[in-house]
Image (cartoon, helix red, strand yellow):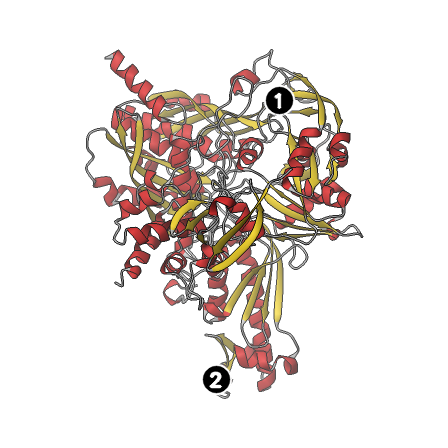
Amino acid sequence: MPDYRNINVVVNGVKHELDVETRTSLGDFLRQEIKLTGTHLGCEHGVCGACTVLLDGEAVRSCLMLAVQANGHEITTVEGLAEEDGSLHPLQEAFWKHHGLQCGFCTPGMLTSLAAYLGDNPEPNERDLREAISGNICRCTGYQSIVDAALDAAKKMRGE
Amino acid sequence: MNDANNKWIGKRTIRPDGADKVTGQATFGADTTMPGMIWGKVLRSPHAHANIRSIDTSKAESLPGVKAVITSADVTNYSPEKSVILGIQDMRWMTRNVMAREKALFHGHPVAAVAATSQKIADQACKLIEVDYEVLPWVVEIDDAIKSDAPILHEFIEFEGKPSNIAGTLEHKKGDVQTGFEEADVIVERSFTTRPVHQGYIEPHACLVSVSADGRATIWSSSQGQFMVRAMTSMLTDIPQSSIRAIPAEIGGGFGGKTIVYLEPLATILSKKSGRPVKMVMSREEVMRASGPTSGSKSTVKMGIKKDGSIVAAQGTYYLQAGALPGSPIRGAVGCAFAPYDIPNVHALGYDVVSNRSKVAAYRAPGAPIGAFAVECVIDEISEAIGMDPLEVRLKNAAKEGTQAAHGPVYPRIGYYETVEAALSHPHREIPLGKFQGRGVASGFWFNAGGESSSQVNITEDGNVVVTTGHPDIGGSRASIANITAELLGIDYKRVSVLIGDTATIGYSNLTGGSRVLFASGMAVTDSTEKVIVSLKERAAKIWDIDPEAVDWEDGYARPAGANAGMFDPLSLEELAERATETGGPIGAGSQLNTAGAEGGFATHMCDVEVDIDLGIVRIIRYTSFQDVGRAVHPSYVEGQLQGGAAQGIGWALNEEYIYDSEGRVDNPGFLDYRMPVCSDLPMLDTVMIEVPNPKHPQGVRGVGEVPLVPPLAAIRNAIYDALGIRFYGLPMSPPVVLEALEQGEAAE
């Protein structure tokens, strides 16, 4: 029989208390229970990075974590990156403006990974950024436009 | 259309779907849900090759929560004896691909499917299905498959009068190669292999299907063509097309791999049987095992050249893996291999070989990278043999307007020569190289496609514009369509909203494939918009009570022209929209075209590598693509195609391959072991867009999406030769392969 646990999580600033099946991954939990489908599942074995979310500000693979492990933590998904008034995060603006996406499937994971990275490393160079997102696979762009977008966003976030 | 005067064509406008995609609002294939929805799951063959004696589904059916179980008996059958053509597919193979019929033909081949109230119950139910297999000898490699005593996959396929795994051939001939080779000063003949590689889209196949009580099906799915989904599902379920509505989701990459169905017909049958909406999503492992990669290949290419650099004869033989059912892209390999060159004597021959692997699907210029790899490597060698720069050899033999290609057509104005010229004069070529660094070049061709596209352009009551087309937007086509419409109407592009219709709301439109979307839908949208402009002029003429011929449309306004010039105040699009009721009613026009004149795309790539001789790792340190792009309607998305194609080529050349275990199973069905390029693997990918407008398109558009994957394989291989003095004849040139070659080289010294 499936085993359930009660968990408390804050997702994009909203508190949720609910019973989850213990084997449910955080990714499936966010997509199916909280109905936030911006977190994309590309490989479900922790390699493609599309499902990356922020757990207390740190980038984590939501496919490799169980929902119960998020108990008591704050989660930010791509839907929570923009301000409450709807104004976009500088990374979102930059990806849009610099065409940092083709199909857009890897984009949520790129944005969340970079949001965490730029928080710790506000002045990256191109090489740093390439390393920083080397755990996120994009098959469409060849990464050029993504790196350009990230460099521009970093600049904006520094207030330049 | 004069470039200098363009306001929107050629501008890097912000894409209409961008906001949804950066905020997580875009709806991809797995994102739709419905009340009462249940989950479908496929049971797959654990054997590479086996007769299916019987399937007992009774235990699965009696598991609580299971709502439907299906096997091939529920899928429309087509006899293997007779072809049932749909576009470029044959439905007698497609029915056997979506569900094994007489035999399981590869490890991962679907043999049954279930739908249950949860994913876990569906998993459990699959385990309760009892399949009685008779395991058969299997074969996965070309050399083994074409041996006289090879296990035969299909008794009904014959070659040279007896059952064979060679399912078809294709031949192109021009001139007489025998005579040609006699004229040559140098002849080089080499054999090559390439491994199957997967398209690698990050979004796994996914769909949701709801069949209503009266038998109408609604399909939400991620594909490269909602009309393909409708047609194939109809043919595999016997539901008429008029009763199927296929709604395209946003697509998370396809590269050709989503031009056929896998899940949609199964989910439709499961939904019909259960009376519930059914959702199906593949795991990455299922994608790697059972959806199509492109072919692995073996080939032999022989080319003859004179000392003055003219190539006088060329011969190529290609064997391509089809997977378990016929249909490898031999046309792309054989047709594109020699297409950049004006060679008087050409003979190209291709064989379609079946083996116990998943059926191949299209992958970006299907077959062409395989064709070009062998040819472009041999050109490097014949150039060296006569002491001429390989770019100069390509320039000397470049196909031009009027050249008769070996695959048939006489080229109109094309820009291949210009790509080589641009490469010769580019600063990349002058950058000095260090130790263990090398530079290579190669060229490539892709046919490009036209075909059917529909569009509808409607003027809203407030004077803005809604454009509907029938093609999933895989790389920014909505932005390009907005640019074209805004340009023609002379209005701000932000006033143009571009939507992708479903099969019930827009006319038939062929696949997003063949680099055809902007070519064909650009034509259809141009046609619709021009009809709208005619209507707008007529309405202004009516208001002014003058002849419609005496009205001009300029910058978003109707203006009196000729003798009436200046007589009336211009009427804006908004004003005309406001007065639509009094001037004839709604303003809008549709267009349904079968487009022709796509014309080929050509590219030349230059690549610098550095080899880590201790680890065998080849690093790409500089990469420049030179491509005739016709007209870059949206330069950022054209560059994106060039960069993305180069990146995929780098993966194909250096790392990607399917590895099979001793039981004929894919041993690396995940992204950890199937190694695609990540950001830190790549340098900046430079692009040089050369615009030789296609004379047969109103905006000069040529397809740009596929040819970027044609040159990289050989460009990288030729660069490694320049770095190490070692010529590789097989892909991938992965670290173990490079290390072994280095060790052998040392041993020889």
Q: Nearer the viewer, residue B672 or B717?
A: B672
Mark 2 nearby-residue class (10 Å; few <14, some 14–19, many ≥20): some
Q: Which residue is mark 2?
A: B565
Q: Report x, y in % for residue B175.
A: 48, 29
Chain for disc number 2: B
Mark 1 nearby-residue class (10 Å; few <14, some 14–19, many ≥20): many
Residue B179 falls left or right of residue B353:
left
Give a yes or no on whether discs 1 and 2 share a subunit.
Answer: yes
Residue B265 falls left or right of residue B722:
right
Tell me which residue sits at (46%, 63%) in the image.
Answer: B483
Q: Secondary structure at mark 1?
A: loop
**Which image quarter holds the N terminus of chain B?**
bottom left
Q: Which residue is mark 1?
A: B47
Residue B361 location, quadrant: top right
Q: Report x, y in % for residue B311.
A: 37, 29
Amino acid type at mark 2: Ala
Q: Nearer the viewer, residue B647 or B317?
A: B647
